Image (cartoon, coloured by chain):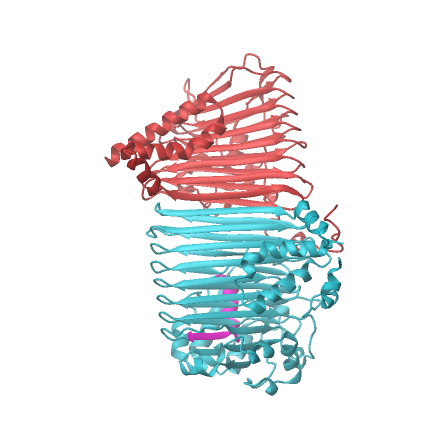
Amino acid sequence: MTLLTDKPRDHVDPQSTVGAAPEESRAARLTSFEVSDFPVPNGREEEWRFTPVDRLGGVFADEGDDDREGDYAADYDVSGVMDVIAQTALAPGQAPRGTVLVPGDRGAVVASKHTTEALHLKLEAEKEYAEPLRVNVHGNGAGRLSSAHYVVEAGHHSKALLILDHTGSADHRGNLEVIVGDGAELTVVSLQRWDDDAVHLGQHDAQVGRDATYKHIAVSLGGSIVRVNANVNYQGPGGDATLLGVYFADAGQHLEHRSFVDHNEPHTNSLVTYKGALQGDGAHTVWVGDVLIRKEAEGIDTYELNRNLVLTDGARADSVPNLEIETGEIAGAGHASSTGRFDDEQLFYLMSRGIDETNARRLVVRGFFADIIAKIGVPEVVDTLMAAIEEELAADMGASA
Amino acid sequence: MSTNIEELNPGLKDLGTYEYGWADSDAAGSSAKRGLNEDVVRDISERKSEPAWMLEQRVKALKLFDKKPMPTWGSDLTDIDFQNIKYFVRSTEKQATTWDELPDDIKNTYDRLGIPEAEKQRLIAGVAAQYESEVVYHQIREDLEEKGVLFLDTDTALREHEDLFREYFGSVIPSGDNKFAALNTSVWSGGSFVYVPPGVHVDIPLQAYFRINTENMGQFERTLIIADEGSSVHYVEGCTAPIYQTDSLHSAVVEIIVKKNARVRYTTIQNWSNNVYNLVTKRATCAEGATMEWIDGNIGSKVTMKYPAVFLLGEHSKGETLSVAFAGEGQHQDAGSKMVHAAPNTSSTIVSKSVARGGGRTSYRGLVQVLEGAKNSRSSVVCDALLVDQISRSDTYPYNDIREDDVQMAHEATVSKVSEDQLFYLMSRGMSETEAMAMIVRGFVEPIARELPMEYALELNRLIELQMEGAVG
């Protein structure tokens, strides 16, 4: 039985006319390698309206890295890649660099231009990498410009875990370009454990092959301003993408996560889940999740979820899930977003069972993060994360005690 | 058992097309001037013998309109030609208080729309009928008038209650609010003015009916509702227009002031023909303990951009929007709601249901804003969209802006297609596919339909059937 009977006759799409018309869909947004296409944002742009651009200053500069004699702006330590078949440097425009990631904003375009040598990790087909591949980025000073671009190419039916760990301080802009081969299984973890004065803008784009599985996990704990955009599209049917995020914002910290899943192929799935906690005056988190289901992409299953837990006064959480669907042949689509404070009833319940308030609060926060932590499934990351959350909470308890 | 929906509903076979698409003879409209400039604005004001301050406001608003950019979000509005539109069409010289006083054409139109019949049966407490730019018929139940309830067209209100009018006009939606609010402020004409004195409850709805007859008409009614302390009122409006080759514009401004512990419900069933741009600004302010409810049905029009808003300014005030939208071929319904929490212990609810078919596009666009100091506010947003075929489109763009920690906020949206299981089940019980589809869609919008006054719920159901005609076959 078919549901489609009335063909689009001579229907003229009102969106097809030119002029000051709104962009037809999220996919129509500008991407380019030209720095001049992305002027320095002033904060009034839709893309930047939540970001404190006045505090970003230097990171938008169309300048190379602040490397000094024997003292680089950032050190890169690459390990666990002995078995990688290629570990070479790619110049701008040298394929596969630029095939998946085309810069979508000012941060990404300057990162792209000023990374003359992109790290290229090519993973062998049909090989399972037992040890995680690691890239440790350590910034050597606040305000020092550093740029990075990584290209990860997972061969068909390979299986691997890549951990990108950011520590220290810098004005960092980093692009990550991921090609997940057919049937491959790749997990990418991006840890933002910066010092308090670091700035980090990142664009992480992935193309998911036929029947491939891609998981992107963003964990943002440190830094003054962190903005990581994780985007996905598909190269064939059967692809599966999971974008996860956990963040914990303290006083004065701005943590922003954006994602865009472009269902451009039929029978592809996506699950986007971001959870965050906020405490302290001026703590600000932003989550913008865009999902587009194109006309030709039938049989899509997608769900987006964002939950924010506000622990103290003066914090602000922005949450914007956008869903664009151009076909009725979908398996399921939805999104949910909620922002709330401590549930007094939960606290009361725990305390009535003899648990003191400090521990009760700790339990509630742990419970809040429990399901996403279960989804992450990378023990090393889970341990780091739990330790960090405990530490944040301890600081809070100390302050309130 | 009959499997044919037409046999079950003998009248239905005529319903394949837009039912309100006829046009009356149009002497007033054909002689009306096109285009917009200061002279047009001055002319409107002069013909209404308005006070100088009103003219001043209009001229100022026109300048704002010229300055404001077209919105670059939402629907494509590039085809609107502001210089081809007729800004003021006077269809009759005198406002009538009985239907028989109206010119035959206009009376017949309202007869066909069924308005006098509803009034006769006392289903409504008062009627205003606006034809082109001005209200042509007006009546209110005597007992309400005695209690001091004002239900007038806005032009008369300005003449007869200038002080009250001036106090509230533009107080909720300033003329510079957006490009179309500025346009409305400069060329407004007609609309309803409602004032309910303290403690008075208007128990059955007041009703307004808006009709565009002239081609390339711009209708810019201005509605102002003031519910004084502890009062309540329900206002209902309906809209239709003939089908023409070129487009008309409807750009209303509706301002509602809900005072302490008062309650206002505003119901719209918009069924403009598919060549009307419907760009409307609607907003209410709620004082302490007040409740504002928007029930917003968008079925007709070519493009609708409408986001009824509630500004919750007093403690324990409450805002609610129920929104239902249908988009068929060539239609874009960009609708939603806006809730601004500016006081502690306020709550808001938005429920949106939309159905897209035949290549139509529905968008939910909403904003929930919790300002600093609005402690212990609660908001819940639920959007459901139903897609009936592969060529239609549904988008959801909610914005949440929370600046206070002591808040519960939830948003949820689902988009689904009509399930083949449901269809199969109904068809196995002897229903045709059309019937089954219409039944599923009716079930989908039922939570909103049951909030409507009886005759509007019936109308909505009939419109759904009409919309679903040709959806399957």
Front-most of B403 and A340?
A340
- Dividing the image into 4 quarters, which one contains the C terminus of chain A? top left
The image shows residue A85, relative to residue B190, as above or below, that is: above
Residue B460 in view in this figure: yes
Part of the protein shown in magenta? B178-195
Single out the residue that lies furthest toward the front.
Answer: B1
Give the left or right position of residue B66, taking residue A339 as reference: right
- Dividing the image into 4 quarters, which one contains the N terminus of chain A? top right
Give the left or right position of residue B311, taking residue B267 as reference: left
Single out the residue that lies furthest toward the left.
Answer: A401
The image shows residue B169, relative to residue A203, as above or below, that is: below
Residue B193 part of the magenta segment: yes
Residue A162 x/y as whole percent: 52, 22
Residue B391 in view in this figure: no
Residue A170 x/y as whole percent: 41, 28
Front-most of B462 and A18?
B462
Residue at (73% x, 60% y) in the render = B5
Single out the residue that lies furthest toward the bottom.
Answer: B101
Chain identity for the colour cyan used in the image? B
Residue B102 x/y as whole percent: 61, 85
Front-most of B168 and B272?
B272
Label tally? 0
The image shows residue A1, relative to residue A394, as above or below, that is: below
Q: Quadrant of residue A342?
A: top left
Give the left or right position of residue B311, taking residue B392 as reference: left
Q: Quadrant of residue B439?
A: bottom right
Find chain A in the image and tell me its colour.
red
Residue at (42% x, 19% y) in the render = A69
